[in-house]
Image: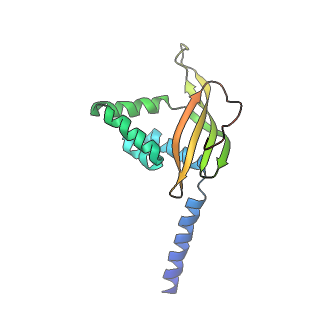
């Protein structure tokens, strides 16, 4: 009985450590991985903040059902690849990430990859870091915006 109880305690501590070790960066990369591999848009909801989930549900409700799969496919095709986290700023339960990734440049005949820079907002809800929004640009921002402003 002691061994069984100790095993449960160890499992609980390991589980708590895994959640506690989550960072805004690791949560964002997990969100991207889920989005890139999703067969259905529902797969990304566990990674979204409450506000982002509400906005996405509203956007989906305005779409004809047949276009939802096409929207996911378009998002996946347009996602920057090989994303690197350049900087992270934390403020209370908010985080802003400055990221870099490669995107296809449709303006070039060979669609060669070009660097793009993103600003990602994350929020800590229910003990987990969740995705709020991201904005991508071709020019690197001079500074990472302060979270929560």
Question: Quick check: 132 above or below 137?
Answer: below
The answer to whether one can see residue 88 in this image is yes
Question: Quick check: 138 above or below 54?
Answer: above
Residue drawn at x 51%, y 32% is: 79
Coloring applied to the structure: rainbow
Task: Pick out the residue farthest to the left.
Answer: 65
Q: Quadrant of the C terminus?
A: top right
Task: Pick out the residue farthest to the right.
Answer: 142
Point out residue 138 in the picture as x, y percentages from the top left corner.
61, 24
Q: Nearer the viewer, residue 117 or 36?
A: 117
Point out residue 29 in the picture as x, y percentages from the top left corner.
55, 44
Residue drawn at x 71%, y 30% is: 142
Residue drawn at x 60%, y 33% is: 118
Question: Quick check: 13 above or below 40?
Answer: below
For residue 116, side relative to residue 51 (left or right):
right
Task: Pick out the residue farthest to the bottom.
Answer: 1
Task: Pick out the residue farthest to the front.
Answer: 149
The answer to whether one can see residue 39 in this image is no
Question: Quick check: 107 above or below 7?
Answer: above
Q: Nearer the viewer, residue 40 or 50?
A: 50
Point out residue 64 in the picture as x, y percentages from the top left corner.
28, 31
For residue 125, side relative to residue 39 (left or right):
right
Point out residue 21 in the picture as x, y percentages from the top left corner.
61, 58
Question: Which quadrant of the structure image shows residue 144?
Answer: top right
Question: Which quadrant of the structure image shows residue 113?
Answer: top right
């Amino acid at each position: 009985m002691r061994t069984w109880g100790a095993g449960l305690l160890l499992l609980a501590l390991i589980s708590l450590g895994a959640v506690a070790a989550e960072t805004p960066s690791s949560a964002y990369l997990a969100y991207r991985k889920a989005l890139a591999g999703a067969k259905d848009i529902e797969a990304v909801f566990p990674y979204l903040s409450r506000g982002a989930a509400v906005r996405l549900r509203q956007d989906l409700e305005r779409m004809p059902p047949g276009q939802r799969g096409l929207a996911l496919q378009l998002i996946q095709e347009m996602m920057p690849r090989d994303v690197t986290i350049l900087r992270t700023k934390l403020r209370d339960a908010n985080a802003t990430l400055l990221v870099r990734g490669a995107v296809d440049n449709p303006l070039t005949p060979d669609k060669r990859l070009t660097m793009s820079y993103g600003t990602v907002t994350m929020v800590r809800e229910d003990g987990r870091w969740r995705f709020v929004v991201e904005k991508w640009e071709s020019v690197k921002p001079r500074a990472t915006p302060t979270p929560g402003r």
